[in-house]
Amino acid sequence: MPRPPRQHKLTIALLKADMPRDAVLRDPDSVVSYVVPSLSQTPSLFVASKPPHPPRWQQYLAPHVDGDMAGLFAASSGAALLIEAGKRLFAVTFGQGRHLLNTEAFERDFGLRVVLNTVVPGQLKSVDSKTIDETTMHTRRDVSRDSTFSSFGLDVSRDLLRAVTGTPQDETLGPRLTGADSLGIHTRLQIPELRGLLSRLLEAYGDDAYKANGFEFIDFLRPEKSVERIHELEERLITDLASNEITDVHLAAPEPLDWLDVEGFRFSTQDSDVTLESDPHITSYLASRKGEELTIGLLKHDRMEAIRASDGFRQATWPILDCIVYQIEYEGQLYVLSTGDWFRVNLGFKERVYEEVRRLPLLTGLPDADPGTDEDAYNIKAAAALDALCLDKKLVYDGGPDKMEICDILTRDGGLIHVKHRGSSATLSHLFTQGVNSAERLLQDADFRSEARTVAARASSEFAEVLSLNRPSPEAHEVSFVVITRSNRDTPLTLPFFSVVSLQRAASRLRGYGFRVSVAAVREAS
């Protein structure tokens, strides 16, 4: 009995409906084209390869080795096969073939929606997410056995689902599917049979079974489809960048990275010997284009590069536009730019988050902030006004690699007040994280309580008894988040949307333990 064809892994992308065939390839002159007679009489297979070259690590090792290390080479190759099915065009890629495609050519969520519409809800293997926060956080969660979505511990109010691996209900699709922008699939089908498979995948892409499967939360963020609206949003982005209005703008790698092998980041607009940044900064990119007119074309052309620590070559590279994280309220809607795509935040979701934060009690008795004040000066002023103890920068060793503040201000009745100036979004994220971590440690860690009590007593003997050595009742402490602001933004505490989401989640977590939570926006005089 003849053996069945071996399984092959295919990576399938759906090209945008309005994308002409001749715009699919990133650099048509760099590929060799072939005709596949069973598909078309015009070229449909495109192949590219890089010539073998010595790996950079050879240069590091060779001077210290007794012998000749010549003859070591590294190379890469890839292919993209274009197939029309269901009146749409698909690209099936092999090896490094995805790098041959124009990044604007394909639908961003094709693979993800196919998987969510076809998967068995209780047989998920892996989930990739991107945290909806001021600082982008990519997470991959794998489980040892197929599990339900809840087993992955995602927070659907702020985690944007990016990729899912699971078992399809229709076994003829294959044993397992992985969906992100593209779809990863193992199949025994041969090239002439792929049209039928692609037609089925296109039908699955247009389905809405994901809602019944428990994934309706992906509609919290919807891609903006209107070309006219996207053009308007791009104009606002350029205006803000050109005028240096970058409070709500930062850069982030648009995909998970092997951080152990990332030496740093640079931009294609900089010299190759520039000092790498451990985190990419929008100010560095803008400085590299100083004096030039910014355009969306430039943001698509210029690239951010992640440089490998192992050999000094690029681990990954992306258009600057794909790395910008930006939000703007425009004509009554909230829009978010992420991974090069514009999303419209579901108004019901936005209002629900805002309403939850607006219901938090307000902390009273705080003084206004003086013009140009910093956090240190304000904490001293506020502590005096509240007859409380300033613990700003009084650190407690928490048993890990870092030290932690108990709070910025400790009140006589056990109130834990955390204060931050409304500066960078990363600072605000730290504010909420600090509040949650400190409260959890006081509740769960006897050693932390003991040292925290010592730190408070060392600062003032009058506060020696405020923090208990015994496990406290959460109701005995009120955790307060205070934001010093000059903004007139009409949002809770004048915060940008992502920060409001972070605050809402921090408050929810603290109240789940039983802590009381309050907030305040302190006006800084101009």
Image: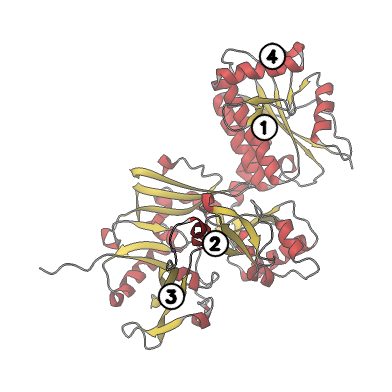
Residue 287, placed above or below residue 389: below
Q: Are marks 1 and 2 in contact (CB under 8 Å)?
A: no
Residue ranking furthest to the left: 1
**As shown in the figure, which amino acid type bears the numbered disc 2?**
Ala
Distance Cα–Cα, label 3 vs label 2: 29 Å
In front: mark 1 or mark 2?
2
> Badge 4, how many Cα within 10 Å: few under 14, some, many 20+?
some
Labels 4, 2: front one: 2
Element at label 4: loop
Tell which tag, 3 or 4, sits nearer the viewer. Answer: 4
Measure how far apart labels 4 and 2 are at the Cα level.
52 Å
Q: Left or right: where does residue 397 sit relative to residue 123?
A: right
Q: Which amino acid type is marked by label 1?
A: Leu
Report helix, strand or loop for mark 1: loop
**Residue at 76% in and 11% down:** 462
Q: How many residues crowd around disc 3 within 10 Å: few (fewer than 14), some, or many (20 or more)? A: some
Closer to the observer: label 1 or label 4? 4
Helix, strand, or loop for circle 3? strand
Q: Which of disc 4 and disc 1 is earlier in sequence?
A: 1
Image quarter hosting the N terminus: bottom left
Q: Nearer the viewer, mark 3 or mark 2?
A: 2
* N-term-proximal mark, 3 vs 4: 3
Which residue is tagged 3?
Answer: 88
Q: Nearer the viewer, residue 233 or 356?
A: 233
Where residue 318 appears, as percent x and y from the top left, is 58, 64
Q: Residue at x 46, y 75 (%)?
A: 51
**Which of these two is toward me, 151 or 221?**
151
Circle 4 is placed at which residue position? 466
What residue is shown with label 2?
A: 316
Give the label on residue 360, or none.
1
Relative vertical location of residue 244 with respect to residue 373 in this rendering, above or below: below
